[in-house]
Image (cartoon, helix red, strand yellow):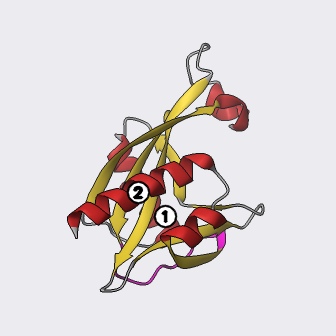
């Protein structure tokens, strides 16, 4: 059963010159975004993120970096079959964000037809959703602090 929350997972790479972020182009519409998806059954957001990353990228995540960026997504964008299992007064669901270091090749699922590694500014410009841009800002600042 689909849980009433969403996750967002931001792949990044570090090199001596810059940090790079991988964004994905959806196969079903012209949108650039990070890995996203919903929880299943009693999964925690972190467990859902690990599963979604594997499903969409074929990457086994060793460590997630939880971000404080959280947004609310209106339920009217979800299929009716999800809504029938949620409380009647569920009008928005939270989206939890995570970063993860990605040093291996990504194999795309059918959800995406392309991905591209970009520096921060270029990724900010290409992303479709404000929530993705906010999470990217937070991840970028956190990675700057570590270096």
Which numbered dot is residue 55? Answer: 1
Q: Which quarter of the figure has residue 112?
A: bottom right
Measure the C-alpha gap from mark 1 to mark 2. Answer: 6 Å
Residue 53 to residue 36: above or below = below
Q: Position of residue 57 (x, y in %)?
A: 48, 71
Q: Which residues are magenta?
A: 102-113
Residue 99: horizontal and vertical position, in percent? 37, 59
- Residue 44 placement (x, y as % from top left): 34, 40
Task: Determine whether 127 is above or below 87 in the image.
Answer: below
The circle on residue 51 is 2
The secondary structure type at the circle numbered 1 is helix
Any magenta on residue 103?
yes
Is 112 part of what is drawn in magenta?
Answer: yes
Q: Nearer the viewer, residue 9 or 122?
A: 122
- For label 2, the SS is helix
Quarter placement of the C terminus: bottom left
Extreme-top residue of the structure: 89
Locate residue 147 relative to residue 83 in the image: left or right.
Answer: left
77, above or below 21, in the image: above
The residue depicted at 61 percent of the width and 48 percent of the height is 130
Neighbourhood count class around disc 1 (C-alpha, 10 Å): few under 14, some 14–19, many 20 upward: some
Residue positioned most to the left: 146
CB-based contact (under 8 Å), mark 1 and mark 2:
yes
The residue positioned 38% from the left and 42% from the top of the image is 45
Say left or right for 132 vs 74.
left
Q: Nearer the viewer, residue 7 or 133?
A: 133
Few, some or many residues within 10 Å of mark 2 (<14, 14–19, 20+) = many
Q: Quadrant of residue 92?
A: top right
Residue 34 visible at all:
yes
Q: Residue at x 32, y 84 (%)?
A: 15
Instruction: Spot the residue most to the right.
Output: 29
Look at the image and tell me whether residue 1 can be seen. Answer: no
């Amino acid at each position: 059963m689909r849980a009433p929350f969403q996750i967002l997972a931001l792949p990044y790479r570090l090199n001596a010159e810059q940090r790079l972020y991988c964004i994905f182009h959806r196969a079903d519409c012209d949108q650039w975004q990070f890995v996203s998806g919903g929880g299943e059954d009693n999964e925690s957001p972190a467990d859902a993120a690990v599963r979604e990353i594997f499903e969409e990228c074929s990457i086994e995540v060793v460590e997630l970096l939880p971000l404080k960026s959280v947004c609310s997504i209106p339920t009217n964008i979800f299929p009716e079959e999800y809504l029938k299992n949620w409380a009647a007064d569920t009008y928005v669901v939270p989206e939890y964000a995570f970063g993860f270091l990605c040093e291996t090749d990504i194999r795309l699922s059918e959800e995406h037809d392309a991905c591209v590694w970009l520096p921060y500014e270029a990724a900010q410009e290409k992303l479709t959703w404000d929530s993705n841009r906010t999470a990217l800002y937070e991840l970028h600042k956190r990675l700057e602090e570590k270096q």
